[in-house]
Amino acid sequence: MRRAFLKHVRRYPWVTNVTLYGCLFAGGDFVHQWFSRGERTDWKQTRNVAVVAFSFHGNFNFFWMRFLERRFPGNSVRMVMRKLFLDQTMAAPLATSVFYTGLSVLLEGKEDIFEDWREKFLNTYRVILMCMSLSQFLNFALVPLYMRTTFTGCCAFIWATFLCFSRQSGDGTAAAALAWMFPQKDDETEAETKTTGCEDKVDEPRAQTATSKP
């Protein structure tokens, strides 16, 4: 199975890589919605994410990886660092900008398509530099060229979940995403509310008994 898959990737690198990248990116949006809404899924939103991923991100990543490999061939530390530097300073800002503006264009009734980009781009880019640099370093150093877009797509599955959250209800920071994933304060508040409610119910019969006495 593994050999058949790798053979297919080598034979049809563009189709396979772009398809897998787009599916994984759209899957990230589905996971975000599943955690956020539970039973109700906005398939139109997932479709818009898939359109952006297939039309730009997958294709751009595929040809960008090949350009970097032709310009800086090999996986020596020097070449890997050069590719990583260009990827994080040129490709990452462009891909993030296209995500925010592209989805705003596809949304009906969105008057200012640059609103999300202005509010969240810088925070999102900081997270890219902190989190995605390591994965791209491993990508350039260890993954063969014909699989690099697919590897990026696997990382993009998690990354797309973060981006979709940031665009809808976050501010582009990792702290907001962690608070969304682990809402400890909300749980504690609900527990305190339930405890207070129980205490009130216990005190009510006592107050009624005291009032009924002559």
Image (cartoon, rainbow, N blue to C red):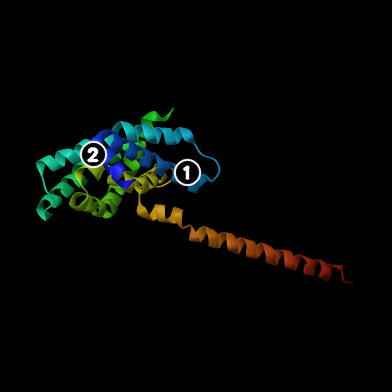
* Residue type at tag 2: Arg
The residue positioned 12% from the left and 55% from the top of the image is 77
For the residue labelled by badge 1, is the local secondary structure a helix, a strand or a loop? helix
Query: Could you tell me if residue 11 is visible in this image?
Result: yes
Residue 118 horizontal side relative to residue 63, left or right: right
Q: Which residue is mark 1?
A: 33
Q: Can the viewer see residue 101 in this picture?
A: no
How far across and down, in percent of the image, does residue 172 sit? 35, 47
- Does dot 2 land on a helix, a strand or a loop? helix
Q: Residue at x 34, y 45 (%)?
A: 1
- Residue position for label 2: 10
Residue 210: assigned label:
none
Residue 192 is left or right of residue 89, and the answer is: right
Q: Distance from label 2 to label 1 (Cα)?
A: 34 Å
Position of 93 relative to 192 (above/below): above
Disc 1: CA contacts within 10 A as few (<14), some (14-19) or many (>=20): many
